[in-house]
Image (cartoon, grey):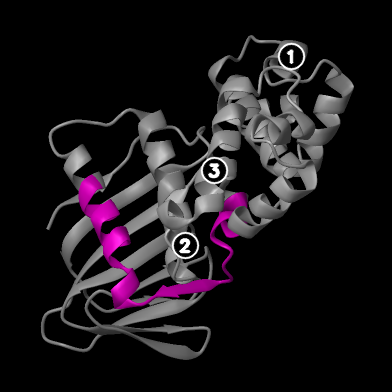
Amino acid sequence: MPIYFTSYPNNLPFSLESVGNRWEQENVWRPRGYPSYHWLQTEEGCGSILVNRERVSLPKGKGIFIKPFVPHSYFRKTEVWKTSFATFSGTLEADIDKITGGGPVICVEPEAGNALQSWVDAMVERYEGRNPEPMEVSTQCYAFFLCLSQQREGLQLCDQAAYSQYVAPAIREIETGFEGRLTVEELAGSVYVTPQYLSRLFRRFFGYSVYEYLTNYRMGKAKELLIGNPRLEVQHVAARVGYNDVSRFISVFKRLTGYTPLEFRRMYW
């Protein structure tokens, strides 16, 4: 029953704090909840979870995703209850709800849970014998949240023509062009649709507009620069994430994080 805990600094958009499978699950009481987002799925046997005063049965294949600090308890219903699990954090932790489209708890039925079980198994394999690159893990965490969002709706991203044709190319453009003067109009033009239609698609898949997605991505990159390059001046950080107006950058950063860039940096240095 392998279990791995990461030792990376929490300065990436998404981080995997722990991951494991074939875990012999015992009863657990958490009256104050758990401090991170976490996923639990039954591999063998059956258990139940008491969360928000409701009891949720967790037979083989079924999984549950719980927000931080939501009170809950685990109870084993069979003599053997084996589970897989993962816990998450990161500088964009507050955006996980937007990606998954969920509330305090998301349940995934057994018939839709295979992809998520495969994700956990694949991550455990990555950790066996080596430490994966932090950015690789962060990217895989994002993939998990997207998969979770689609499985709870009974959809498959790869089967969504609109996602493949319009959203995925726009995301690739954001990831490669965020440092420049990239606009929503340019993103929409690159996939030959109107900005309004592209934003509707982004809201459908992620819960927020193209502009919000681009801004959040830029702010995530800004956090990486602020922490990873402590001597880099704020105006240079702003320029490297697509802001020529440093005052505008500081205003947006504070609105989304609650801190100025320098205040955010001081929390880590």
What amino acid does circle 2 point to? Answer: Gln
Judge depth for marks 3 and 2 and give the one in front: 3
Residue 96, above or below 215: below
Pick the front one: 133 or 99: 99
108 left or right of 92? left
Which mark's residue is nearer the viewer, 2 or 1? 2
Compare marks 2 and 1 and give the one earlier in the sequence.
2
Question: Tag 1: residue type?
Answer: Ala
- Which residue in the protein does label 3 denote? 165
Query: 77 or 241, which lies in front?
Result: 241
Density class for disc 1 (Cα within 10 Å; few <14, some 14-19, many ≥20) is some
- Please tell me whether mark 3 sits on a helix, a strand or a loop: helix
Name the amino acid, label 3: Gln
Residue located 65% across and 50% down the image: 202
- The verdict on residue 111 being magenta is yes
Residue range in magenta is: 95-122
Disc 1 marks which residue? 239
Residue 11 higher or lower than 154, as above or below: above
Q: Quadrant of the N terminus?
A: bottom left
Asked whether residue 48 appears in the rendered view, the answer is: yes
